[in-house]
Structure formats: C-alpha cells, structure tokens
Amino acid sequence: MNKLFLLGISLILGALSGVLATPKKVIILRHAEKVQGGNQLNLQGYERSAALPYYFSGTPLYNDPAPAHIFAPGLEEPDSSVRPIQTCTPIANHYNLTLNIDLKHTETDKLAQEILKNPKYNDSTVLICWSHGHIRPIVLALGGEDPGEWKSNIFDQVYLLTFDGSNKPKFQKILQKLMFGDRASFTDNPLSLPARTTKRIDEN
C-alpha cells in the first residue's frame, strides 16, 4: 500500500512539474553584426560578441541569478548561419556553461516548451541568442507580450522576460549601449561603422 501511495505521489509530482516548471528570467538577444551575404559575423560583430560577456556579467539585472543555460540554433546545413553560435560562445565560456545547439532556428515553440516544462530550468536565468526573424515567436511562445518586429538593422537591444508567478511574464526591452553607434534611446537610428577606404590619410 505504501509503495502504491508513493508511486501515485511521484506520478502526480511528475505531471505537475511539466506544468509548473518556470525559469526566473529569460534573456533574448539577436546575433551580432553580420557579413552581408554571408553566414559569419563581421568585424564589428566579433567585437560585440567579445564585449557581451562583460556586459551581461557586469549588469546586476541579468545576474539574479546569473545565466545557467544558453541556447543558440544548431547548424542544419553546411552553409547555415553560424552567427548566433559565434555571438554567444564567448558568453558561454565566460560563465563556464555548455552551449545548447540542439534545436533548429525554426523550432521556437519547441524551445519555449523545453524551457517552460523541464524542471531543470526552474528558478534559473536562461539566455537565448537567435536570428531576429524568429525572436518574436519565441517571446510569444514563452507567454510574453507581443514585442513587435525586430528590425533587420538592429543589433544593440536585449529582451528580458521575468517570471514572477503572474499570468504573463514581465517584458522589458533594453538597450545595450555597448558599441560605437549603439542607440542612446529607442527613437534613435543605429549608426554603422565608417565605410572602408583605401585612400591614405596624408593624401589630399
């Protein structure tokens, strides 16, 4: 009888864990600046990816608790974009975490269900680095308010979802203010690096 009772309790708890499992925070960002027409980061993108670990670890808002899980889309084809992996690998190394690349970039619902129903993410901070066209579905699948379109020329912002037990997680849009040309406010337009020139400085 005792064994049956314990088995019943364990089954109930197991079922509840799939419903109640929630992180404390989910950080979502786009990969850094890219080579036009390629699948890699450009120089500015590599500079941002190198600075992001210190941005996240040095900002208390992202460290209550510190990120414990990091996701980026895996490579589906030989020519798939490696930009999200390139962007968040330095962050994973900084926090001494394994980068999860098990999901495709289109598997946004599956990503959300993994985070919301797997007990290992309970009360943790999860960081997601994805392509901009699939970030809105990730936010919606996690229960957040509609963030609108993430524009193709934007690389300097972060979405933060905070789960506090209410029906919907609190949604925040945050500017990194990290690199040259990053916006000071959401009404500003991002600046690009000056165009490359082969002209010598001492030429007239």
Image: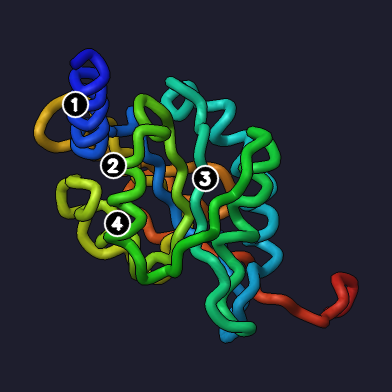
Q: Which structural element holds mark 3?
A: strand
Tag of residue 192: none
Q: Of the residues shown, which amino acid type is indicated by label 3?
A: Ile
Q: Residue at x 32, y 62 (%)?
A: 108
The residue beneath circle 2 is 117
Left or right of 146? Residue 182 is right
Q: Secondary structure at mark 2?
A: helix
Q: Residues within 10 Å of mark 4 (few under 14, many from 20)?
A: many
* Location of residue 68 in the rendering, given as x and y in whole percent from the top left corner: 52, 33
Residues under labels 2 and 4: Cα distance? 15 Å
Q: Is residue 34 left or right of residue 114?
A: right
Say which residue appears at 28% left-offset and 33% top-offset: 22
Q: Is residue 188 above or below residue 107?
A: above
| Whole-number angstrom distance, CA of label 4 to CA of label 1 | 35 Å
The type of residue carrying mark 4 is Ile
Of pointers 4 and 1, the one earlier in the residue sequence: 1
Q: Of marks 2 and 3, which one's residue comes earlier in the chain?
A: 3
**What amino acid does circle 2 point to?**
Lys
Q: 175 or 64: nearer the eye?
A: 64
The earlier-in-sequence mark between 2 and 1 is 1
Mark closer to the observer (2, 1): 1
4 or 3: tag closer to the N-terminus: 3
- Residue under the point 39% across and 65% down: 132
Report the disc number at residue 8. 1
4 and 1 marks in contact (CB < 8 Å): no
Q: Relative to residue 16, is residue 198 depicted above or below?
A: below
- Residue on which disc 3 sits: 70
Q: Amino acid at mark 1?
A: Gly
